[in-house]
Image: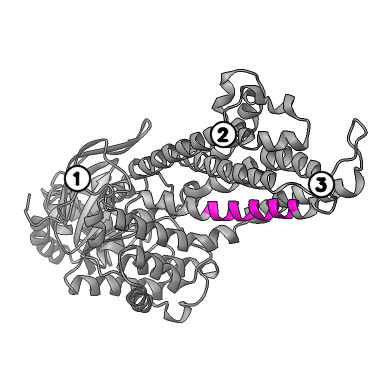
Amino acid sequence: MNPFALLRATALIYSMHFGAVFGSKRVLAAFVLAAMPPVLGGLGTRLAPETVDGSVMDGGGIFTAMGVFLFLGFVVPMLSVSIAVGAVADEVETRTITYPFTRPIPRASLFLGRWLASLTLILGLLWLSGGALWWISNWREPGPPNELVHAVLLAATSGAVVYSIGSAVIGTEFKRGLVIALAYAFAFELLVANVPGSSRELTIQYHMRAIVADEAIKELDAEDFLRTKSMISASGALMKMWIVSGVLLLFGCWRVGRKQFVLSA
Amino acid sequence: MSGAAIVQAEGLGRWYGEVVGLGDLSVSIEPGITGLVGPNGAGKSTFMKLMVGELRPHRGELTVLGHTPFASRPLYRRLGFCPQQDALYESQTAVQFVRDLLRLGGFGRREATTRANTALERVGLEEAKDRKVNGFSKGMRQRMRLAQAIAHDPELVIADEPLTGLDPIARRQVLELFRGLASEGRSVILSSHVLHEVESLTDRMVLIHRGRLLAQGTVREVRSLISKHPSRVHVGARDPRRLATALLGQEHVRAVSIGANGKDLLVETEDAAAFEEAFARVASEVRAGVQSLHSDDATLEAVFDYLVG
């Protein structure tokens, strides 16, 4: 495969679909979802002055609670899955896939270009959400330390990449891809990531938590939940997530290049 | 089979689960305009999807312009496909839609824009080129699909039911477009289940039924293949009953029936040439006042009716 042709076609597909991704009906729901952590964080700074043990919750604590549990645990997978699962599946559902598929481009570019357009939206919303949460958490002194903010955003970015590629692949392979991807993210992961043992390493959540664990525990006593004693290092988690992303990306490109999509008239 | 064939299929089979899309299709299509004809569910669209590489055959061999179609980038530079499904990128304007697909075909932005404008003009959408396609009528959307198929000047245009949903004016415009493409030396394969549409454009056809080739050639060639079927001749006469009685005595006349209006005869004969020779003699003998005489053998509808029973 000519890499220049792949890059050119990917860029064209990306530019064709970037606007469409932002104009889709899902975006409104995605904005609402992304607004949840800062809105709840803001409520936390105003309405929840104390933790359960009676100590005052500072900005760092609020950021950790919202950032680790709500943002990484719910918003990242939900946003990533719901937007990226349609990367290729939407073209099949609208039956427009015929057009790029009858053009002299590497078919893998359809997967790459559309996934990248989805990822742009996902990361844009996540960074906005995380940034807003950080800003709101600073309403209460002391605010979250920079290391923690960086760790949460790094975990969110890495998690979004893996979730989104995985979802795009699932959407390509299965007719009810959204249901399957959500079932993976919120049934399988929820169960397995919280069960002690090495099976947790099968989940994206485990690796995201590993990236933030060291910083988060300084702010919030959540060691039991995070189960850091058996966790891999942040750099190890990051490495594994990028390797998995690469493998999934190659698999997605290969599948789209080989797959036949049966479209009804 | 001819070496100049643009499409060559041998034992082509494709099925969807237990449903047979194409059974065992062997066909060779020459350059020019060819009509792919068959009733709904005959396998026309499946054959087209195989020809454009949207699907792979489960059995058999298929080449289009010398290429195996599935994901063939060299073929897609030479091929334009107008799909049957009413699908467009809804948020785009007409010119954006065609231009972006041209850019995927390797054209630079400026040339793609020029070609998109030309293609939209050819399909009669020049005035709507800056409108979003989601506001287009069914006929305009059909022409959009055609515009993207011809915009890169392909050697071969494959169009799946391209006349469906068009009003008479647009239909004439599209037929003219196909004739124009043919006069430029390009080939067109179009499918239809409305036979007279194809017949008005070309007399070269491929008839498919239940996933198999039923017949191929000109209407008359196909007709000659089916000698076991009777030819049908419509006769208008002042005294049809007397004429019917006389005709029934002829050796090659299989059946004669009188139409509901009491004036027309429908004659079925096993030998059209012998019938024509005998008819003039019989008609003058019985003085039945023959007013009209025509055979529907030359119409595609009749041929198709005969072939599929």
* Disc sitting over residue A59 in the figure: 3
Callout 2 and callout 3 share a chain: yes
Gap in angstroms between the C-alphas marked 1 and 2: 36 Å
Q: Dividing the picture into quarters, in which one does residue A9 lie?
A: bottom left
Mark earlier in primary sequence (2, 3): 3
Residue shown at the point (69%, 28%) measured from the top left: A226
The reply, left or right, for residue B293 in relation to residue A108 is left
Q: Nearer the viewer, mark 2 or mark 3?
A: 3
**Majority secondary structure of the magenta segment?**
helix
Residue A180, numbered circle: 2
Determine the secondary structure under disc 3: helix
Where is residue A52? Give x, y as percent. Answer: 89, 32
Report, in whole angstroms, how far the alpha carbon at label 2 lies from the one at label 3. 37 Å
Q: Quarter of the image holding residue B204?
A: bottom left
**Which quadrant is home to the C terminus of chain B?**
top left
Instruction: Judge if badges 3 and 1 mark residues of a common chain.
Output: no
| Residue A218 shown in magenta | no
The relative height of residue A114 versus residue A249 in the rendered view (above or below) is below
Magenta residue span: A118-134
